[in-house]
């Protein structure tokens, strides 16, 4: 048995060598950006286009402008598989060099919220994460602009009201919320409940357990209730199954609206023609028709430097990745105006996020006019003043069909502030005074 | 040569019954534990402590728990994740309701709560065995997770639906919460796992452990010689769940910082079961080796290409990692079906004869 000593040696190496510290990729003269991606695992269909959008936008900036105001960007991907523990491992490995992170999973965001102020790293959860963190007085290091789940849900109700011919017509209407039974899926519930009381519609909450492959009983209930509208907060395979089941029971697809994590190509393609007419909320437009895409094609894809296939540019999650990268960059750029064109510290970058003012004019300069709405972040309001829209699937592509909808802020904000007191209190935080910030 | 018990005479019953009767073993373990207490907090950086060593210790404790139940008492369980969740949620409820209570005591109390739940879900083991029992414990896994998901009381009605570790101190030093330093968390986790391992080691050598093994090897024969199956099996479930509960509380309070029920899903149960199987059923050392293998190998495989300067796409790396990891599991199980602990035992035998093997 000559193999035994070898085996033991092998084992000793595997266990004792353990994780080796990674080599520092970033030099002093670059802005280091860690990217948490999930290109493998059960949610890869959403993760891949998103990661490609990120990559292409950062590479575009390096190619076209030489980085941010001449400071190059160094990106490093870390695979999380959308798994919280692997995300924490990524964060611990990369946080030393990072000034901001995009956790790209609500679970990972919750891990990073307490750690961010300690490590002086900005956590930007764009349109996901903890809604209460939109109160910047309690959570200075966490940002979730352009919008939160609560604002989104209120925009949905506003849209439904407009479709029914006025918000007062909601009285007596039946709305069902089909949601992923996790903190993420439950996010919209309190807002919907408040609005149900205010406008007098009947709300039914139907939970679907993770991962959501089995929804027969849920849709039987939907059939019995026969709701006027369905709001879907799903994720991954749950969306595909929900859209298919809705089509199977013959529900009118125009009256089923997903949230913005339930409205991508991969969610509807599986249901084929049955998905036609299905709608979802969004905060940006899909498609490769914007000026920034021309730059991407010219400077990256024509030179063979693109992250994906040409025809996949412009998918919903691809554009979302791009917009996320753009918001990161514009925040850093804002900070550079104050602190100079050099790699910045976490605290300086945080100031940039908090004072981001993305005007229509600026959007035009970066080639994203019409892709999303202008945005302004303040010390109190880390959600910004983003607006949502409704997009519809026509069997081939997603098209925005509504005007930009202003959330019902006078309902959302007081609830949000109350939640921030609770969540901030749990972490032992004190509310800061924004009038003293400069 | 270097590992020879010749000349070590025991002159008292105490010496004969020592945990480590050979002085080489004793010193090796003592030095190892001392090194574990001193070296990493001084030398390791935060990444090593927070992302590598703390999860290793937490899972080692959970693996010891499952090993007592599955390895020693022979009751196959897939409910580990659920029992860990019980520990985590009860620790959260206890420490938010009684903030002045020492957090270490809270860990032990939450272990007791988990033990109580374990006792209840252990009752079917009196009627059903083997795979059927595994299915019954699977039910406990799903039921407990569903319960924590369903009842907002368990998360103190937080709108986020997650539990977060608050700031808690031991002897005036912060050990949990976001501001606790990684070395402190590590030391707490290490102290708990050392204490747990010592207790477990003594348990399995004594009357309790022997009755567990008797039940495992043949329950009817055990009953005939006077081992009470009800008491023995339930005790195994209770003590095992105690360990898992403490490990679950540590997972949230020392490692993750905050968690939702998804952190305790069925994958956790499988993970801990694999640790026990790969490490070695019926071995305390095996629990450590198994946890080390399952926790460290993926991290090693992720970082190794970086370290040798290989730059590959992360997705490809992940796929390679999964393949190599799967391959290694198969490899070790084929070469040594009794687990890594058995390999260690064989190595010890070899050392005993070295340098003159026959």
Image (cartoon, grey):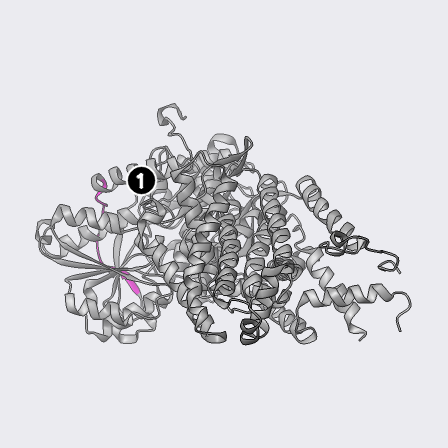
In screen coordinates, is A355 left or right of A8? left
> Percent from the top left, x then y, of residue A84?
48, 54
Q: Nearer the viewer, residue B68 or A274?
A: B68
Answer above or below: position of A276 versus A339: below
Is A174 one of the magenta-colored residues?
Answer: no
> Percent from the top left, x then y, of residue A337?
47, 33
Image point (41%, 59%), residue name: A318
Image point (50%, 60%), residue name: B235
Q: Nearer the viewer, residue B173 or A164?
A: B173
Q: Which residue is under mark 1?
A: A419
Q: Nearer the viewer, residue B354 or B333?
A: B354
In screen coordinates, is A371 left or right of B218? left
Answer above or below: position of A354 versus A363: above
Residue farthest to the top, as pictured: A436
Image point (78%, 65%), residue name: B347
Task: State the extent of the magenta-drawn residues as a range.
Answer: A398-409
> Percent from the top left, x then y, of residue A401?
23, 59
Secondary structure beneath disc 1? Answer: helix
Whether residue A276 is visible here, answered yes or no, is no
């Amino acid at each position: 048995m000559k193999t035994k000593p070898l085996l033991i040696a092998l084992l000793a190496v595997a266990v004792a060598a353990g994780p080796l510290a990674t080599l520092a990729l970033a030099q002093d003269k670059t802005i280091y950006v860690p990217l948490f991606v999930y290109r493998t695992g059960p949610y890869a269909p959403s993760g891949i286009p998103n990661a490609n959008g990120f990559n292409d936008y950062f590479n575009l900036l390096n190619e076209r402008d030489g980085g941010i105001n001449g400071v190059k960007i160094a990106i490093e991907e870390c695979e999380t598989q959308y798994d919280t523990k692997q995300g924490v491992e990524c964060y611990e490995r990369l946080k030393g060099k990072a000034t901001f992170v995009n956790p790209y999973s609500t679970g990972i965001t919750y891990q990073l919220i307490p750690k961010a102020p300690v490590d002086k790293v900005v956590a930007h959860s764009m349109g996901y994460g903890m809604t209460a963190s939109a109160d910047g007085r309690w959570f200075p290091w966490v940002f979730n602009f352009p919008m939160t789940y609560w604002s989104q849900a209120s925009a949905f109700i506003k849209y439904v009201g407009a479709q029914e011919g006025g918000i007062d017509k909601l009285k007596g209407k039946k709305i069902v919320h089909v949601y992923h039974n996790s903190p993420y899926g439950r996010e919209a519930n309190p807002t919907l409940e408040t609005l149900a009381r205010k406008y007098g519609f009947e709300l039914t909450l139907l939970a679907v357990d993770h991962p959501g492959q089995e929804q027969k009983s849920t849709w039987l209930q939907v059939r019995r209730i026969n709701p006027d509208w369905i709001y879907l907060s799903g994720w991954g395979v749950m969306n595909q199954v929900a859209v298919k089941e809705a089509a199977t029971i013959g529900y009118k697809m125009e009256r089923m609206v997903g949230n913005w994590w339930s409205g991508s190509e991969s969610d509807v393609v599986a249901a084929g023609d049955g998905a036609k007419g299905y709608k979802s909320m969004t905060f940006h437009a899909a498609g490769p028709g914007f000026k920034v895409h021309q730059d991407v094609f010219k400077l990256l894809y024509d030179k063979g430097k693109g992250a994906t296939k040409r025809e996949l540019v412009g998918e919903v999650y691809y554009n979302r990745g791009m917009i996320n990268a753009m918001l990161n960059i514009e925040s850093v750029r804002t900070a550079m105006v104050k602190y100079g064109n050099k790699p910045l510290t976490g605290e300086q970058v945080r100031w940039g996020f908090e004072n981001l003012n993305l005007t229509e004019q600026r959007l035009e300069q970066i080639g994203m006019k019409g892709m999303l709405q202008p945005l302004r972040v303040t010390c109190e309001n880390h959600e910004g003043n983003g607006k949502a829209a409704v997009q519809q699937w026509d069997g081939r592509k997603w098209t925005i069909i509504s005007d930009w909808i202003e959330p019902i802020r006078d309902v959302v904000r007081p609830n949000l502030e109350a939640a921030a007191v609770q969540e901030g209190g749990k972490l032992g935080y004190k509310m800061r005074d924004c009038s003293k910030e400069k | 040569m270097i590992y020879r018990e010749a000349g070590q005479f025991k002159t008292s019953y105490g010496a004969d019954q020592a945990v480590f009767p050979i002085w080489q073993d004793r010193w090796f373990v003592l030095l190892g534990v001392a090194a574990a207490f001193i070296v990493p907090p001084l030398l390791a950086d935060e990444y090593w402590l927070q992302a590598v060593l703390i999860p290793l210790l937490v899972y080692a404790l959970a693996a010891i728990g499952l090993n007592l139940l599955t390895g020693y008492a022979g009751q196959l369980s897939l409910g580990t994740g659920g029992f860990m969740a019980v520990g985590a949620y009860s620790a959260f409820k206890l420490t938010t309701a009684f903030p002045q209570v020492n957090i270490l005591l809270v860990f032990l109390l939450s272990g007791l709560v988990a033990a109580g739940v374990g006792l209840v879900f252990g009752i079917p083991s009196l009627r059903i065995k083997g795979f059927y029992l595994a299915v019954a414990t699977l039910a406990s896994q799903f039921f407990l997770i569903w319960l924590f998901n369903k009842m907002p009381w368990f998360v103190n009605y937080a709108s986020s639906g997650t539990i977060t570790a608050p700031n808690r101190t031991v002897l005036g030093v912060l050990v949990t919460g976001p501001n606790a330093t990684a070395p402190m968390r590590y030391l707490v986790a290490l102290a708990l796992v050392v204490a747990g391992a010592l207790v477990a080691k003594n348990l399995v050598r004594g009357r309790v452990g022997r009755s567990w093994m008797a039940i495992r090897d043949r329950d009817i024969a055990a009953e005939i010689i006077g081992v009470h199956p009800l008491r023995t099996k339930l005790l195994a479930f209770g003590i095992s769940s105690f360990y898992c509960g403490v490990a679950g509380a540590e997972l949230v309070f020392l490692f993750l910082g905050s968690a939702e029920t998804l952190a305790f899903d069925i994958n956790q149960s499988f993970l801990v079961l694999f640790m026990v199987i790969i490490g070695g059923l019926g071995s305390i050392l095996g629990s450590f080796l198994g946890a080390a293998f399952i926790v460290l190998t993926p991290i090693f495989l992720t970082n190794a290409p970086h370290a040798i300067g290989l730059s590959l796409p992360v997705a490809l790396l992940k796929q390679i990692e999964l393949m190599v990891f799967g391959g290694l599991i198969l490899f070790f199980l084929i070469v040594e079906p009794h687990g890594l602990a058995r390999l260690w035992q064989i190595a010890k035998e070899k050392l005993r004869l070295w340098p003159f093997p026959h």
